[in-house]
Image (tube, rainbow, N blue to C red):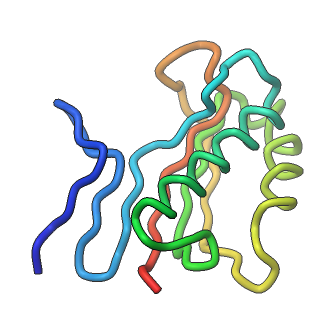
Amino acid sequence: MPIQRLRTEARYSDIVIHNGTVYLAGQLADDYDGDIAEQTRQTLANIDAALAEAGTDKRHILSVTVYLKDIQADYVGMNEAWDAWVPAGATPARATVEARLYAPEVRVEMTVIAALP
C-alpha cells in the first residue's frame, strides 16, 4: 500500500496516511499570545482541519500525545478545552508530558494517530 504525504515540507510531512492510519505531526495554535485554554482550542481546531483533509475526524482518533510547556501550570486549562472538544464515548488513548517546545510562547503541542473510517 502506498504512503500518502500531505502538507510536505523539507523536514517533515504534516499528515501521513498509510494502511488506513493517519499520522499528524505536532499540531500547534496559530496565535501564541493566548493562554493555555486558547492555545489548546486553536490546536484542537487545527487537528480537526488536518483530520478532515486526511478524510477522517476526531471520532476516529486512536492516540494523542500532548506536550505541555509547564504541566503544573497548564494541565487544568488544557483539560478544560480538551474535555469540551473530545467526543463522549470516543476518547482516545492519551499521554501528557512536559516538554521544552520550539518557541517560548508555545504552551501546547499535540501529535495524533487516527484511523480512516
Give how far across and how far down residue 10 sits, in percent. 17, 30
In the foreground, 95 or 53: 53
Relative to the observer, which residue lies in front, 73 or 112? 112
State the image coordinates of residue 100 (x, y, percent, origin top left).
53, 25
Image point 49% across, 73% down: which residue? 56
**98 to 88, vertically: above or below:** above
- Image check: 75 left or right of 70? right
Point out residue 101 in the picture as x, y percentages from the top left corner: 52, 25
Where is residue 90? Give x, y as percent: 70, 81
Q: Residue at x 64, y 51 (%)?
A: 96
Tell me the quarter of the picture where residue 40 sits.
top right
Vertical placement of 114 versus 5: above or below?
below
Figure quadrant of residue 31: top right
Farthest residue, direction left: 2
Q: In the image, is 100 to the left or to the right of 21?
A: right
Residue at 81% from the left image edge and 79% from the top image edge: 88
